[in-house]
């Protein structure tokens, strides 16, 4: 009854912006030269992105007080830690997603990309993800009261030629779909009658570049898929299958303790994932990766296109970390304090420097959170844990009714949005964002995982099957809805009983 009452109470308030958007669509406003401008009589909180940070903010923000507009080219949230599992069919793609329009129906979602953010005039220029038949992408402007930038980062290619054209990434659900299809195609190609040995071996070599948690989880999960499902259907090919993990550092999973790194390496040795450390990929062609081994001096001098080992492959998965999106580079480049904070850094490594309240330094009424931000003084890891906690913190801060003011590195507190707030709210605001680390986990295949928990100065490590059970229970509890929880549980049971689906579509 309470939910029904709350919903009914909110219905008449459903955003005027939504009505305005409908009108715009019907009348075909927004000519080539003048983008449509969105306005509203409630304070507009513009949220850019629909990932971990934005999603947790959207769930908590009070839409009675504020008009929350979410602009993102992706109309759904993705539970990224399970992308590697979905790329081999342990769980289905849709089980990881939640449509943003369902996450909070009172938030106005617009499928578009913010291209220009004018932080002085507090205006965002956005372009639709889709184009009309004449190729024009509709544009609109949002005049915001406060903006939350939670646009994450894009995959870093380090300028290695051929990566964008030939590699698979693990960032979006479309990446996992493409990867799953390609793995199936490689097996079918190798199984064709008369396939020469050289082509068969090439098709069945799977290279994973990057020995961080994502690369390691994918290598382990792929090996499970090969040993558990493909071995039954293609027994004659098993001698030729190779999963190779390439890592430029001297060890994998460098965030974990040395003992846990060794456990991961031992598991890979037993399950047949071949790990090469101290190796850098310097060029990729359609079916070959060029590798340089340490020391990389020759590579660093720029003599990269000759020599090195050539490794044929059927699938190459690139998972070597993140780089700044163009919008972040533009905002960071336009604000003097930000430029100073980034001095000497490669523009691709740019992040928005934020104060302890997550306000962007040197910018009025603007917040950055998640992977695209860097907390001044004490940088936090670029993880879903951090982004999710930051999103909820910011939503609570905005709900309490505070104007953010201009972010600075001087620890100034945010000014009040309106006078007369209760004293405990003031106390709340005197608390800067504090990250609560819930530890690190990684699945390494064969129902084995590693876990590292830290509480104050004490740390606790777990590896093996128990850790795997913990990993699964954490992932199931961290799902963003009951629907997702049920879907994932169902997928796990289905995979245990019937195996993974091998169809290619
Ligand atoms: P994202 O979640 O990347 O969201 C960014 C959003 O911004 C997207 O919706 C994007 O479409 C949108 N966007 C992009 N450009 C624009 C624009 N111009 N305008 C508007 N919107 C835009 N972390 C963990 O803690 N544990 C794990 O086990 C773990 N596993 C991972 C596994 C994989 C395969 C990957 C890829 C990541 C994993 N992470 C994990 C990291 C975690 O996913 C990220 O740290 C987290 O997604 C960061 O959240 P975010 O909100 O900053 O950005």
Image: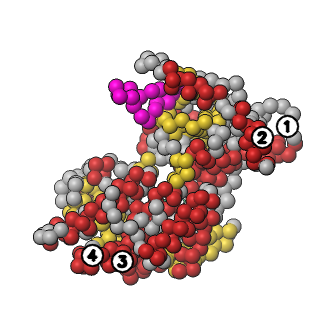
| Mark 3 / mark 1, whichever is N-terminal | 3
Q: Nearer the viewer, residue 224 or 216?
A: 224
Mark 4–mark 2 Cα distance, whole angstroms, equals 60 Å
Q: Quadrant of residue 169?
A: bottom left
| Mark 4 / mark 2, whichever is N-terminal | 4
Residue 410, horizontal then vertical, whole percent: 69, 39
Q: Is residue 40 above or below residue 68?
A: above
**Contact (CB < 8 A) between labels 4 and 3?**
no
Horizontal side of 316 relative to 394 (left or right) equals left
Q: Nearer the viewer, residue 371 or 175?
A: 175
The residue lying at 61 percent from left, 27 percent from top is 19
The residue lying at 47 percent from left, 64 percent from top is 91
Q: Nearer the viewer, residue 130 or 288?
A: 130
Label 4: state its secondary structure: loop
Residue 402 seen in the figure: no
Name the mark nearer the viewer: 3 or 1.
Answer: 3
In what quadrant of the picture does the C terminus appear?
A: bottom left
Q: Quadrant of residue 177?
A: bottom left
Residue 106, horizontal then vertical, whole percent: 66, 39
Which region is colored magenta? 125-141
Tell me the number on the disc at residue 421. 1
- Asked if residue 136 lies in the magenta stretch, the reply is yes
Residue 421, horizontal then vertical, whole percent: 85, 37
Mark 3–mark 1 Cα distance, whole angstroms, equals 61 Å
The residue lying at 57 percent from left, 59 percent from top is 484
Q: Mark 3 — residue?
A: 227
Label 2: state its secondary structure: loop
Q: Mark 2 — residue?
A: 400
Tell me the number on the disc at residue 234. 4
Task: Give the class, few, some or many, for how many residues have Cα within 10 Å of label 4's Cα (few <14, many ≥20).
Answer: some
């Amino acid at each position: 009854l309470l939910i029904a009452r709350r919903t009914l109470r909110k219905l008449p308030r459903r955003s005027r912006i939504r009505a305005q958007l409908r009108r715009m669509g019907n009348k075909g406003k927004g000519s080539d030269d003048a983008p449509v401008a969105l306005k509203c009589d409630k304070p507009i909180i513009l949220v850019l992105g629909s990932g971990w940070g934005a999603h947790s903010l959207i769930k908590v923000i009070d839409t009675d007080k504020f008009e929350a507009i979410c602009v993102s080219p992706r109309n759904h949230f993705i539970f990224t830690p399970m992308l590697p599992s979905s790329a081999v069919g342990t769980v289905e793609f849709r089980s990881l997603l939640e449509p943003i329009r369902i996450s909070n129906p009172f938030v106005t979602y617009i499928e578009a990309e913010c291209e220009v953010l004018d932080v002085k005039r507090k205006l965002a220029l956005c372009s639709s993800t889709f184009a009309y038949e004449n190729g024009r992408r509709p544009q609109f402007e949002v005049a915001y009261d406060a903006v939350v930038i939670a646009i994450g980062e894009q995959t870093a290619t380090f300028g290695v030629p051929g990566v964008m054209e030939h590699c698979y990434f693990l960032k979006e659900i479309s990446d996992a779909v493409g990867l799953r299809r390609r793995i199936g195609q490689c097996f079918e190609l190798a199984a064709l009658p008369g396939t020469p040995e050289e082509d068969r071996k090439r098709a069945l070599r799977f290279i994973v570049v990057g020995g961080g948690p994502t690369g390691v989880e994918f290598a382990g999960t792929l090996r499970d898929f090969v040993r558990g499902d493909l071995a039954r259907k293609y027994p004659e090919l098993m001698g030729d299958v190779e999963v190779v993990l390439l890592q430029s550092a001297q060890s994998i999973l460098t965030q974990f303790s040395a003992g846990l790194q060794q456990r991961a390496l031992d598991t890979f040795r037993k399950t047949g994932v071949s790990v090469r450390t101290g190796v850098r990929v310097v060029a990729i062609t359609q079916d070959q990766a060029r590798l340089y081994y340490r020391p990389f001096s020759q590579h660093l001098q720029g003599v990269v296109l000759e020599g090195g080992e050539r490794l044929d492959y059927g699938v190459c998965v690139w998972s070597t970390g993140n780089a700044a999106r163009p919008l972040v580079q533009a905002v960071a480049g336009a604000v003097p304090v930000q430029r100073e904070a980034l001095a000497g850094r490669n523009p691709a490594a740019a992040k928005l420097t934020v104060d302890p309240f997550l306000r962007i330094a040197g910018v009025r009424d603007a917040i950055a959170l998640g992977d695209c931000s860097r907390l001044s003084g004490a940088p936090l890891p670029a993880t879903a844990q951090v982004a999710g906690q930051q999103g909820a913190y910011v939503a609570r801060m905005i709900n309490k009714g505070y104007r953010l003011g201009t972010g600075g590195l001087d620890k100034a507190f945010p000014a009040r949005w309106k006078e007369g707030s209760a004293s405990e709210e003031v106390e709340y605001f005197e608390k800067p964002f504090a990250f609560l680390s819930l530890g690190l986990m990684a699945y390494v295949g064969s129902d084995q995982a590693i876990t590292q928990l830290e509480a104050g100065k004490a740390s606790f490590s777990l590896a093996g099957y128990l850790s795997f059970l913990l990993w699964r229970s954490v992932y199931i509890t961290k799902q963003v809805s009951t629907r997702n929880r049920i879907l994932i549980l169902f997928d796990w049971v289905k995979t245990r009983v019937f195996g993974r689906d091998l169809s290619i579509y």
